[in-house]
Amino acid sequence: MTIPIQLTNQEQVQALLLEGGNSKHFSQSASKINKWVIFGGILLVIAIVGFTTVYLISTRRIILPVSMGNVKKISDAIYGVASLSLLGAWTSTLKKDERTYTEAITGNDEESWLSSISLTPPLVEQPPLEPLNLTEEIKNVRGIRNPGTNCWLNSLMQMILCLEIDKINAIGDIHPSINRFIRDYIANKGNPSKLNTTAIRQYLGQHIPDIKNPATSYKDAHEPFVFLLNEIRKTPVLEGLKLQITQEFDHRPEDPTEEEVDNNGMIDVCLPEKSKPVALVELLNIFNRNDQPQAITDDSGKKYNKTSESNFLSTAPQDLILNIKRYSHSITTFLGIKFPSTVLRKDAIKLTGNLALEEKYFLDKVTANYELTSFIINLNQAHYISYIKKDGKWFQANDATITQVSDEDALTAAEQAYIIHYKKV
């Protein structure tokens, strides 16, 4: 049975892109890419000439018949034009790379194809996407193809599939791109190299602008992971979990502030200031109660110290996910240009296969035992891989390549873990 649905323009484009398109709808895009190359080359030449001129003026190799004050103004103007030209050349290169990346995925030029199709057909017959009941765990680990810069997303999806998804009874409520990916992963049909996360990345790009450009690798995968976790928060697995934050200040020690926020099972754990091997339980103790003074400025501009902060989960979640804050913050210039941080701390963390948490971490004063099930590491700030435990065996998931590893090798790799998943036992 099929149902008629009216798709919006954007949905039609995405649906056609997911199908890969048809080559007859595309025209050759080499000339269009060459235009960007030529444009970027012209801007680069202007930038080089501008910077060279500024250098010659500043070293008095070119003498201008004007006052020194005007010489500085002229130099600043030329420097500004050269800087903008260099930025324009770099932007045109990204535009070219984005087209090249699109062709690498679809095999054709996206813009030429989209310009040749109508975005307003009457009705599209499409089979309904029924909710999927997962009654048993995924039995094996499948490779996921990486068409370019999706290694971080591939690793995140490998970890998400380790959650208690067998209890999700209405997975059809999740976005279709995630729904279809999980269906294909579980079905384990056809060529494994065809399984990829491109559609999920397109969906994430609508909510996280930093990852819209498919030619750019995404450094800190924490934000998209939180978004994906929130997508399934309505499931019984993560429903109702809270995080209580208590803060004490030096100017009002008798009046601490308390805040209760929703939590999806993930907590952020900071590394110590000094680089040294540290046990995971030490980081959790800092999360539970951090007595390190921190300078705070209130809305009125008054400065004072936050003397302590305590964090408690309302109860022990089925899936405990730890985000080790290894990245520094991104830098945004006055022009609004965001440069992802390249600082990745490589401090070793001593993980154990089993984790026993005391009642001090939970408001309902329970104790809980957890088993290490999966984690993600970042290799040389450029490539993400994940380690997954299935049926008592550890596997390294490096995009489409799955390799079984020993328990010792897995725990050694876990010393550089970035996002960690413990399952309650």
Image: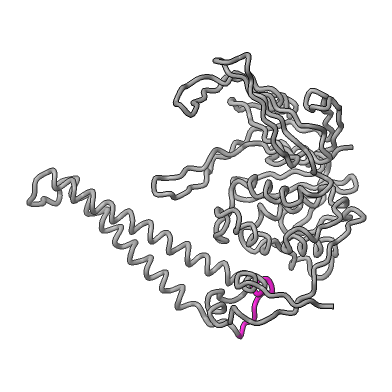
Q: Which quadrant holds residue 402?
A: bottom right
Q: Residue furthest bottom?
A: 24
- The residue lying toward the viewer, choosing from 170 and 66, is 170
| Above or below, 247 relative to 202 | above
Q: Where is residue 145 in the image (x, y as percent from the top left)?
A: 71, 62
What is the x, y in percent for residue 40? 38, 65
- Kindly identify the residue that appears in the image at 68 percent across and 46 percent down: 226
The quadrant the C terminus occupies is: top right
281 is higher (above) or lower (below) than 47: above
Q: Is residue 311 visible?
A: yes
Residue 20 in magenta? yes
Up-down relation of residue 403 to residue 119 (above or below):
above
Q: Nearer the viewer, residue 216 or 357?
A: 357
- Specify start and end residues of the magenta stretch as a single range: 16-24
Q: Residue at x 56, y 74 (%)?
A: 110
Quadrant in which residue 136 is drawn: bottom right
